[in-house]
Amino acid sequence: MKTLLRGLFAAALAFAFSHPAFAQESPAEIRFGISDAGVGGKPKIGGSWIATVHQKGLLEKEFEKDGIKIVWYLFPGAGPSTNEAFSNGKVDFGFHGDLPMIVGRSTGLKHKLICAVGRFGPLYFVVPSGVKAKNLSELKGQKLSIFKGTNQQLLLSRLLRRNGLDEKDFRIINQDTFANRTSLATGDIAGTITSPWDLEARGVARRIVEIRDDKLLHRPVTLWVGEAFEKKYPHIVQRIVTVLVKEAQWASQEENREEQFRLWSQSGRPYADYKNDWAGYALKERHSPLLDEYFVNAIKESVRESKEFGLIRREVTVDDWIEPKYLNAALKELNLEHFWPVFDARGNRID
């Protein structure tokens, strides 16, 4: 009997190690930290194919057969809240703008950048409708609002420098995205960076800056995975990236433009805002997941600027931070290696 049991046990082990589905360990749940939330804290966001994946439940469908739960944490506190959740072991993946991602890395958070999620796009500087200023210089000495610790803070610093200004020329206060829009409506601040369309429709604010074609002003939004999770479950990371890249292809097709805007409007932000913000942009360019020369240089520039503006103290290296193998494997599997345009370090198409 003992000999028979040993034989059965050995056969079971041999079967398990010969079949990856049995041999590879999988997590009970996969947790995503999203540095955004819908209007009024709604548990839906817009503006990217990550938002579309979330709303369609694509990862839930992918892992349902494995009994793996997908958990989404949407943080109104944006990037700093995602960093805090990751440092406390609450999330495995993060969706981040450049500054909070860099700040986290500089303070010792261990993650790998595995694909871009968005790039390019417009920038608006908006003032209350009663403010007479026509440019940023005319606002010197007045109170501006920005969500500090997020990519908006770095974006404001870039914008001011391009106009021969810096934060010391203003009184800068910290408010989240929804608070600074309220402050515009009440006239409690002189201006902020935000989308203007709904505010202008209500007659409470207006644009004094609109920049739509400056590929070096914006930086890519990125998806990262915690190093510990990536080392333990590389097969899971690969499946996730493949699902994401497949959806990025769908989102990049012009015939799907209107449908995704309607999906995104479930976040509480009006459909018209997305339509106006994305007007004139090729979806393939803005939705690209590629870790191309533009992406690498953009992150390096954000690191340099973060140090220059005193937003980080420690050095952050980029080349050892990026892990392209999952994206490359997904592009090959899905036959999408030449689907998205490739950009050089200056944002010029080279394909």
Image (cartoon, helix red, strand yellow):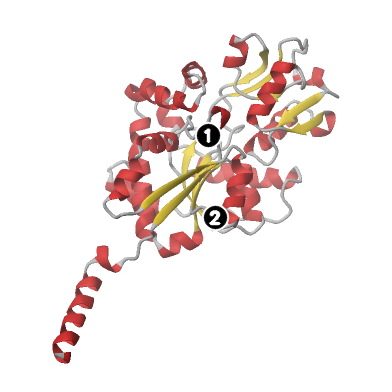
Is 315 placed above or below 150 here? Answer: below
Residue at disc 2, secondary structure: loop
Q: Please give the residue where the numbered disc 2 appears in the rendered image.
A: 319
Q: Residue at x 44, y 47 (%)?
A: 71
The part of the image, by quadrant, that contains residue 261 is top left
Q: Choose between 265 and 259: the one closer to the eye.
A: 265
Is 16 placed above or below 31 here? Answer: below
Q: Is residue 207 visible?
A: yes
Q: Is residue 160 left or right of residue 195?
A: right
Other residues around mark 1 within 10 Å, as few (<14) / some (14–19) / many (≥20): some
The percent coordinates of residue 314 (x first, y second) are: 71, 56
Which numbered marker is on residue 347? 1
Residue at disc 1, secondary structure: loop
Q: Is residue 127 visible?
A: no
Quadrant in the picture for the N terminus: bottom left
Other residues around mark 2 within 10 Å, as few (<14) / some (14–19) / many (≥20): few
The part of the image, by quadrant, that contains residue 60 is top left
The percent coordinates of residue 129 (x first, y second) are: 71, 11
The part of the image, by quadrant, that contains residue 152 is top right
Q: Is residue 300 left or right of residue 42?
A: right
Q: CA distance from mark 1 to mark 2?
A: 19 Å
Q: Residue at x 31, y 50 (%)?
A: 63
Q: Residue at x 40, y 30 (%)?
A: 284
Amino acid under disc 1: Gly
Amino acid under disc 2: Asp
Is 284 placed above or below 64 here? Answer: above
